[in-house]
Image (cartoon, coloured by chain):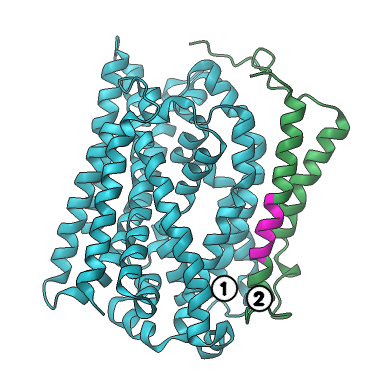
Chain colours: A cyan, B green
Amino acid sequence: MNNIEVLAVFLSLFVLFVALGFSASRWRKGDLNDLGDWALAGRKLGSYLAWFLVGADLYTAYTFIAIPESMYVKGAVYFFAVPYVGMTFGVALITMPRLWKIARKKNYVTAVDMIRDKFNSRSLAVLIAITGIAAELPYIALQIYGMQAVLTVMIGQLVSSNAASITEISLIIAFIILAAFTFTSGLRGAVVTAVMKDAIIFTTVIVVIVLVPIYIGGFGHAFASMPKLPTGDTTLAPLFLNGFISLSIMSALALYLYPHAINGVFSTKSTKKLRFSTALLPLYGVGLALLALFGILVYGSTKALAMVHLYGAVTAVPSLIYAYFPPWFVGFAFLGIFIGGLVPASIMAISQANLLTRNVIKPYVKNLSAKTEARLAKWFSVMFKFIALAFIFVIQATYSLQL
Amino acid sequence: MTAEINADELSLKTKGTTGQKATVAILLLIPVIVFAITPIYNFDGPKLFGLSFFYWFETLWLFVSAAFFVAAAFLLNKMEGDEK
């Protein structure tokens, strides 16, 4: 494998990604000194862009790394993510347009803005805002964990020593760049780059799910080669039936409690466009289902298995891609997975920053101008990214899904 | 800001006839209920491309869910009318 070629493709596409992220500030230009504009892209996204944006929330390192890793290690119970994404949008279709209407009328930026008004309690709003901020931190850390998995394989194959420290330095550089363009472009940066990210990811998923089974002799071969997994292989082990059902239902009810999901909702142009894009989101889950199956395909390939043993189960998807495709495609796919962690991290940090400025600081500071509010939020979005990065360096996770 | 959120003022009450509301409810509930009753798809066969029923059925049902949800979204949009 020509690893220099992998790196060259990866880096060129990364430059394109960064250029898109920065130039997004001029896209559908608004007043970026206003929090609603910076954090919600001017509230004028149509159905398809909103679809990509909310899809970016769903299609994260959770999908590329955590779910396939868990399928590989533990088996069928982790397919719960499929019913989860199938159900969650049915719930959202009823609840979210209502929240959207209130938010538009009252100029809300976060879901907590509504809680404060509805329950007329500043302290309840502060507590819920802090809960939201805390809940996002491990989720951002999971994105970094996924990016780390890609770099581990790419850099591990490229250099013979110091791979771990080069990976860490690369992650820090990537985060500085991400923080800079989130600061400049806000949610616009995430929307524009989300389209690039998903174009790459969709292509990769389709190519892999078609070609790898052909190379390894079908899913039948992968299933036949796999050991007995703790929660079931071809079907769910009976013991895990209840766990499967409760995990999927609870996750379905919880997705839209994540503050970053609300950004996607509030940034759409109208309730009609919001409903249409929400209704189409289960299609995004098809990619998730296929990626989960990559965790099983690994068992059909001695080459991929050898890499997974070397770099850890977290690299199930990158190893599978590395084992079967030419260097240019590996670079392309790895970049997709890498920015698949960066884009959601950007949206999540924006939503945390909104909560902190809007619902924790603003109520207690008199005469906070709109301009100062937006500036504070931009700096907080930088801060939260680096807190999450510190989180990953301090606590090394065993299984990414537990984050 | 005002404390109370007035549902009438915000026109949060769902418009449309009872029949339309019931149709929306059915369109949304069918995909959700099928997904929630895991024992009806937790089988090995029939297989598709070497995948057990458990895996391919759930994947296929995502497409079906999207179709049901789009139908519900169209109906809800129609019930909402031309208001902004």
Residue A107 at least partly seen: yes
Q: CA distance from mark 2 to mark 1?
A: 11 Å
Q: Earlier in the sequence, mark 2 or mark 1?
A: 1
Which residue position is annotated with label 1?
A76
Give the residue displayed 22% in from the left and 51% down from the top.
Answer: A174
Q: Residue B64, image x and y in percent?
A: 71, 56
Q: Residue A193, image x and y in percent?
A: 37, 45
For disc 2, the chain is A
The image's mark for residue A238 is 2
Looking at the rendered image, the disc whose residue lies closer to the viewer, 2 or 1, is 1
* Quadrant of residue A186 within the rendered picture: top left
Q: Residue furthest left?
A: A161
Q: Residue A185, image x and y in percent?
A: 31, 33
Give the residue displayed 52% in from the left and 85% down from the top.
Answer: A222
Tell me the kind of residue under disc 2.
Pro
Q: Which residues are magenta?
A: B58-66
Question: Is A17 situated above or below A46?
Answer: below
Is residue A185 covered in magenta? no
Give the residue displayed 71% in from the left and 20% down from the top.
Answer: B82
Tell me the kind of residue under disc 1.
Ala
Residue A291 at least partly seen: no
Q: Quick check: A386 left or right of A99?
A: left
Of residues A347 and A283, which is closer to you in this image?
A: A283
**Which type of secondary structure does the marked residue at label 1 adopt?**
helix
Circle count: 2
Is residue B63 covered in magenta? yes
Q: Quick check: A63 left or right of B5?
A: left
What main secondary structure does the magenta stretch of the protein show?
Answer: helix
